[in-house]
Amino acid sequence: MENHKLVLPEHLNQYGYLFGGHLLQWVDEYAWIAATIEFPGCTFVTVGMDKVEFKRSVKEGTILKFIVDKTRRGHTSLQYRVNVYCHDQREDKDLVFSVNVTFVRIDQQGNKLPLPYKQV
């Protein structure tokens, strides 16, 4: 799955660079969307992100490209790899961030549920 995001002034810190928290929010959101599309009707919550390390800074006006791929399916959980690149119209120039996001399926009371056997 692929998504894009334009970095706007409200996403920047006092030095003019993207706040890392915004990037983490977008990564979490896009990975959650991938899980929800793949398993409609299931409720997922984020239970973890592995090593959080920013590879380069991002300035206003940058278009970020998010590539989301499922890497693991467990009994109640899913893991997606999210790679974020600075994107221009010619190529993906630089890797900004890469992380594994893990979700677990829950019921209305917050208890873990098995993933459905079939996925859409």
Image (cartoon, helix red, strand yellow):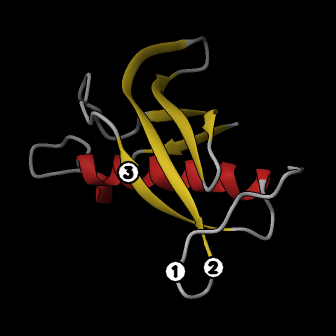
Marker disc for residue 110: 1
> 1 or 49: which is nearer to us?
49
From the top left corner, tell me how far across and down residue 8 is, in percent: 38, 51
On screen, residue 96 versus residue 78, left or right, reads left
Mark with earlier residue (3, 2): 3
Q: CA distance from mark 3 to mark 2?
A: 18 Å
Image location of residue 1, percent across then percent down: 70, 36
User: What secondary structure is found at the residue carrying circle 1?
Assistant: loop
Residue 119 to residue 80: above or below: below
CB contact under 8 Å: marks 1 and 2: yes
Q: Residues within 10 Å of mark 1 (few under 14, many from 20)?
A: few
Task: Tell me if I can see residue 8 in this picture.
Answer: no
Q: Quadrant of residue 73?
A: top right
* Circles 3 and 1 in contact, beta carbons < 8 Å: no
Question: Vertical placement of 15 versus 68: above or below?
Answer: below
Q: Residue furthest bottom?
A: 109
Disc sitting over residue 48 in the figure: 3
Q: Residue at x 26, y 44 (%)?
A: 18
Which residue is painted at 25% across and 23% down in the image? 56
Q: Nearer the viewer, mark 3 or mark 1?
A: 1
- Determine the residue positioned at 57% across, 69% down: 112
Mark 2 highlights which residue?
Answer: 107
- Of labels 3 and 1, earlier in sequence is 3
Give the amino acid at mark 2. Answer: Asp
Residue 85 picture location, percent across and down: 46, 25
In screen coordinates, is 23 left or right of 90? left
For the residues labelled 3 and 1, the Cα–Cα distance comes to: 16 Å
Mark 1 residue type: Gly
Vertical side of 88 occupied by 54: above or below: below
- The answer to whether residue 59 is seen in the rendering is yes
- Amino acid type, callout 3: Gly
Relative placement, left or right, of 22 versus 13 is right
